[in-house]
Amino acid sequence: MKIHIVTTGGTIEKVYSESSGQVENVAQKIDRYLQSLRLPTLKVEITPLMNKDSLLMTEADRDLILAVVRVKLADGPVVVTHGTDTMVETGKLLKEKLGDTAFPVILTGAMSPLGFERSDGLQNLTESLLAARILTGGVWIVIHNEVHDVDRVRKDRPNARFVPITSDAD
């Protein structure tokens, strides 16, 4: 089976910069982490699209993500690595513009960068690859061992997690 990974940046791809003393989006690094996984029956195709903090994404960036995901969906599921702050916004745009899809589109990210101690990045990436194999078509957020319909989830910033929306008031 083939799964497409489209990388857009976000915390999952941030690295510590000694010169600035901050974590920054510098270079795509998902491929290095995929090499550490055992994926004997899976072909993964990585498309590095951008490397941005999601708070800095523009409408044009989201349109580019949509265009690339639309092309990749022609032959398999798509995992989009994305910053968690605006992941739901991008997911809703994808759902609205793509309509019904034969394969799932999974958005995932991390609260702390891949490679940092106690990072959730590798776990979320691994779970997203499994979810891409077993979920039905649609747009999903897969993070912290949970699967969320993009229309029924929000980021709980104080607790650094995603939670289901249980009513229209949420």
Image (cartoon, helix red, strand yellow):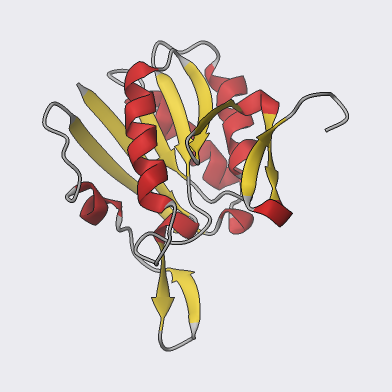
**Residue 132 versus residue 9 in the image, above or below:** above
**Residue 150 versus residue 75 in the image, above or below:** below
Q: Is residue 89 left or right of residue 20?
A: right
Q: Is residue 169 left or right of residue 44?
A: right
Q: Is residue 85 left or right of residue 11?
A: right
Q: Residue furthest left?
A: 40
Number of callouts in the render? 0
> What is the x, y in percent for residue 35?
17, 49
Name the residue at 52% across, 27% down.
140
Q: Residue furthest right?
A: 169
> What is the x, y in percent for residue 10?
49, 56
Residue nearest the observer in this picture, 77 or 149: 149
> What is the x, y in percent for residue 156?
70, 46
* Observer able to see residue 77: no
Q: Quadrant of residue 113?
A: bottom left
Q: Quadrant of residue 116?
A: bottom left
Name the residue at 34% across, 64% down.
115
Name the residue at 47% across, 36% down.
145
Residue nearest the observer in this picture, 2 or 38: 38
**Residue 123 versus residue 23 in the image, above or below:** above
Q: Is residue 17 left or right of residue 40?
A: right
Q: Quadrant of the N terminus?
A: top left
Residue nearest the observer in this picture, 145 or 50: 145
* Observer able to see residue 18: yes
> What is the x, y in percent for residue 74?
32, 18
Q: Quadrant of the C terminus?
A: top right
**Residue 1 versus residue 59 in the image, above or below:** above
Name the residue at 43% across, 12% down.
136
